[in-house]
Image (cartoon, grey):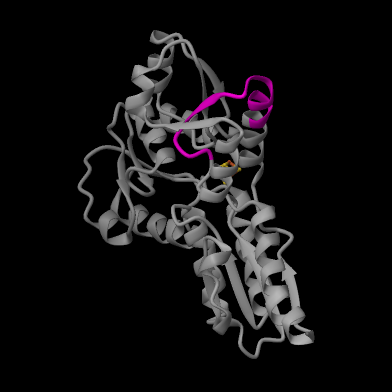
Amino acid sequence: MVHIEIDKHSGFCFGVVYAIEMAENRLHETGELYCLGDIVHNDKEVERLEELGLKVIDHDRLRELRDVAVLIRAHGEPPETYRIAMENNLELIDASCPVVLKLQNRIRQAHDEDRQIVILGKKGHAEVNGLVGQTQQEAIVVSSLEEAEALAIDKPVSLFSQTTKSTKLLYQLKEKMSEKFEDFTFNDTICRQVSNREPELRKFSEKHDVIVFVAGKKSSNGKALFSTCQSVNPRAYFISDVAELELSWLAGASSIGICGATSTPMWLMEQVAQHIDAHVNQVALA
Ligand code: SF4
């Protein structure tokens, strides 16, 4: 019998749980709710909520809407979105994660003190857009050590990070930038819901022959956490859906671990576990 285990530390973080609960409560009351961007970077979970009446919109569509309810997801939004909502008489259901709101405040404060804000993050990512929006678009977003090394800034510098970036890269950046800039402050703003998962995932990945990592292709923390699995287990595979699983990956394995990102619903990991069980155990017994 092949041992199959789902990592108990994987699955939604509290920020995502909170946003989905807010959406579900409203959908049960009215059957309709607009959501600015994917509520979570997981297509399967978005499809489930769309069946309940969720309508995912972009910022262009937001400008056209009047007098309806719109959910702000956990990633948060720049001040511009709140201004549009006021003008268009939109009811905002604000599910911005408290961790992101705190980071937005810290960035705004440092910017008000006339410091140059540098953010380790992915340009164009929704959370990063919300952060840059706190600085009148003046923050510089970097994604690598090379980009940080090339910075030419002649004022005090403060480094922050998108909440889901890699802790290792952030601390490498901090070292480089503290050598380069005289007046430099550093803020470790990686969310502990993500960074605390790295050591747990490492242990989990080591103890299984094969790891099946489940996450949406757009999930930043999915990419970061998957690379943690791969660093200790070369037989780690990334899938977004059961249909992407290849049974050849599981050949000869006596234990298989299933894990995922902070945006991966538990029901999806359970589906993957059942699918694997049906093929490697029940077919073998038949
Ligand atoms: S990963 Fe952290 S910051 Fe992002 S939504 Fe979850 S709890 Fe909030």
Identify the residue shown where x is 26% and y is 37%: 155
Work out which quarter of the rendered image holds the C terminus and state it: bottom right
> Can residue 113 be seen here?
no
Identify the residue shown where x is 55% and y is 71%: 245
Residue 221 vs residue 21, the one in the foreground: 21
Residue 105 vs residue 20, the one in the foreground: 20
Determine whether, in the image, residue 215 is placed left or right of residue 121.
Answer: right
Please, is residue 1 above or below residue 105 in the view?
below
Work out which quarter of the rendered image holds the N terminus and state it: bottom right
> Can residue 75 be seen here?
yes
Q: Residue furthest front?
A: 286
Determine whether, in the image, residue 279 is placed left or right of residue 50.
Answer: right
Please, is residue 236 above or below residue 166 in the view?
below
Residue 45 vs residue 5, the one in the foreground: 45
Identify the residue shown where x is 66% and y is 31%: 24
Q: Position of residue 80 (x, y in %)?
A: 36, 21
Q: Position of residue 189 (x, y in %)?
A: 51, 45
What segment is highlighted magenta in the picture?
24-39
Quadrant of picture, ligand 1: top right
**Is residue 56 on the magenta stretch?**
no
Please, is residue 229 above or below residue 107 in the view?
below
Q: Residue furthest bottom?
A: 252
